[in-house]
Amino acid sequence: MVAVVAVCFLIGYGIGKLIKNMDNRIEYPATERENVVDNYFGTEVADPYRWLEDDNSERTAAWVKAQNEVTFDYLSKIPFRDAIRERLTELWDYPKESAPSKKGDWYYFFRNDGLQNQSVIYRKRSLESDECEVFFDPNTLSDDGTVALASAAFSKDGKYLAYATAASGSDWIEIRVMETETRRVLDDCIKWVKVSGATWAPDNVGFYYSAYDAPKDGVYSSKNEYQKVYYHRVGTPQSADRLVYSDPEHPLRYFYAWQSDDSRWVFVSSSEGTSGSEILYKRSNARKFDVLLKGFDYDYGIIECEDDQLYVMTNEGAENYHLIRIDLNDPSKREVVIPERENLLEGVGSVGGCLTAIYLEDAQNKVYQYGMDGTLIREVELPGIGTVSGFGGEKEDTEVYYSISTFTSPTAIYSFDIKSGKSELYLRPEVKFNPDDFTTEQIFFTSKDGTRVPMFVSYKKGLKLNGKNPCYLYGYGGFQINLTPSFNPASIMFMEQGGVYVFVTLRGGLEYGESWHKAGMLENKQNVFDDFIAAAEYLIDNGYTSSKKLAIAGGSNGGLLVGACEVQRPDLYAVCLPAVGVMDMLRYHKFTIGWGWVVEYGSSDNEEQFEYIYKYSPLHNIREGVKYPATLVTTADHDDRVVPAHSFKFAATMQHAQAGDAPILIRIESKAGHGAGKPTSKRIDEAADTYAFLFANTGTKYRKIENSK
């Protein structure tokens, strides 16, 4: 690809001046268009808003300010916006608690009283006791709530906590260490860490982590290259950390280190992107690593290492994954412990001397318990249908805690007796609505190429399917990520108003094995958009909604999904809600960790891949003179995963091209990132604005709801 020219010319640009739109439509801030053209293998592609890629410039800051002024002025005039926020606040305000985990002499768990910006770590000596104490409150990390707890890892003996913090939603983190007995924060501070956390070594005095070189100017680099693995010993400075592994010949690889509980073996998992991995290993006293499982055609996940036997979950030779065991003294000796089944093996846990395998059947979980030799002990009798998480712990544990989530009720926690196989309810939150008022059905529809695709459709019982219901259609479709039942308070508010809330299980995920993933990646990415469009058509054809009432939504890769479907079928929806989306498919790999997505999308640097990427890239398929649906683009100024330039350029181009009256707005959150760690207050504000925009542009009247519980 050759850059041609970058000459600036003005079209009456000025933040204080606004483009005069006809027919009393919204007056958008004028956005300067520059003559920037790139040549991709003979195809010239204009990029007039290239300057918006510099999100640190005063020019871009002024543009952001002007866009936000227009957006929030529009939102402020929606009469029921405050009522929506009030109801969302009520629905969010319930006690949330995680499953407990025993470390040392204490049981630790997260708890949020309801509206706390971040959940607090509590601890208690006995689970039978009602007495507990605050162990660590992340809400005290900053006065304005912009510093978030990104991860927390206890040493096995429970003496130390290594916790990571992120500022303003950034993916960059800093790791610190707390002495749990005294709750004293030590002087340890690990910087320049990204796509990593702390993994404690069995010696209980140090941990492994992966980091990048410190920049010379003290500013995080826009390119993330040459990640290295280190071992940090508690009480020593980062400068003294021992380099465990680096690979100067492959600057774009990620690394993760782990040591066996008996301290005999050290492993490094290497990946070149978001799928495919390689496992390296060595004896702890050896000098160099050897390749155990060569990359990068398959996925390998280490589950356990016991008596020199390594348990690995992989899709090598098993599209739906299986569990294998490798003799580390003779790696040629491999055997299948849990064979492949018809349904996807989503995860395997090791606890209490047993293995627990979580399967996905039509995007709903089933769990089986096995001996370490692969002997089936039982199918775990789950108390309900939904998304299951947990079932991992220590060899010495006699019980373990797991959770179940659904679309219509928040996460409930259960205890599981490893020997008897019995589950008992540990905690079910009290909420301010009646979950029995709502229902979820799983529907299968046919996509463009004849593929059978499922979706979950939730609504209030008694709803009439007359085509007059507002509908929120959400999808993702990529990166082997499974879309399974989960609870969101905003969905309850929407269904109370007669809305139909839909999650569609698109190709690109892993719900039906690796073939389902491959059918939605690289040259097959259009299948994902076809699935989403077919879901919309099914909902319309069967009376769940209509084109005048349908909103589509998705974030990150799902933001790409919404953008692509909007430009391909603008006639099909009333509202489009792309969040932190990958919109510029020709340049995404040039920013931060975007290069890691090339294995999923392909790259414009490759002529064959450029051809199919260019055909669906949302930014490059916007057409002037088209009436596009009402669009609310959402992003954040500190998103260093999917940089905000994607959303900036998409919104500016849509505003320039829009021929209809529907608004094209962009909401840019300050001091926030890709989404992880966002404070509760910001989540509620964003949801209120999103649904107010949806209701206003689908002709939906908001009715005040009194608490039903």
Image: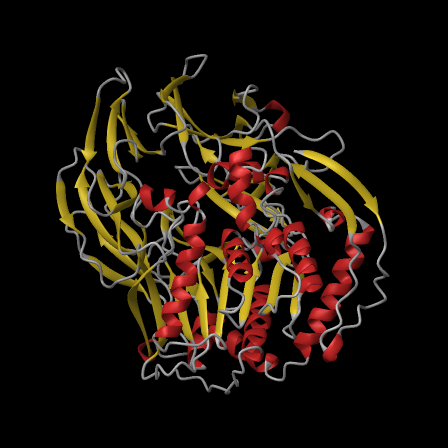
Looking at the picture, tell me which residue is in the foreground, 116 or 622.
622
> Does residue 298 appear in the picture of this structure?
yes
> Does residue 190 appear in the picture of this structure?
no
Position of 519 compared to 270: left or right? left
User: Which residue is located at x 41 percent, y 28 percent?
Assistant: 296
Above or below: residue 28 compared with residue 316: below
Rendered location of residue 272, percent (x, y)? 48, 31
Looking at the picture, tell me which residue is in the foreground, 542 or 202.
542
Rendered location of residue 553, percent (x, y)? 50, 63
Above or below: residue 100 compared with residue 513: below
Number of numbered labels in the structure image:
0
Above or below: residue 173 compared with residue 255: below
Rendered location of residue 172, percent (x, y)? 61, 42
Position of 552 compared to 424: left or right? right
Give the residue at the far top of this rendering: 287
Q: Which quadrant is home to the C terminus?
A: bottom left
Position of 27 compared to 207: left or right? right
Rendered location of residue 266, percent (x, y)? 40, 23
Q: Which quadrant is home to the N terminus?
A: top right
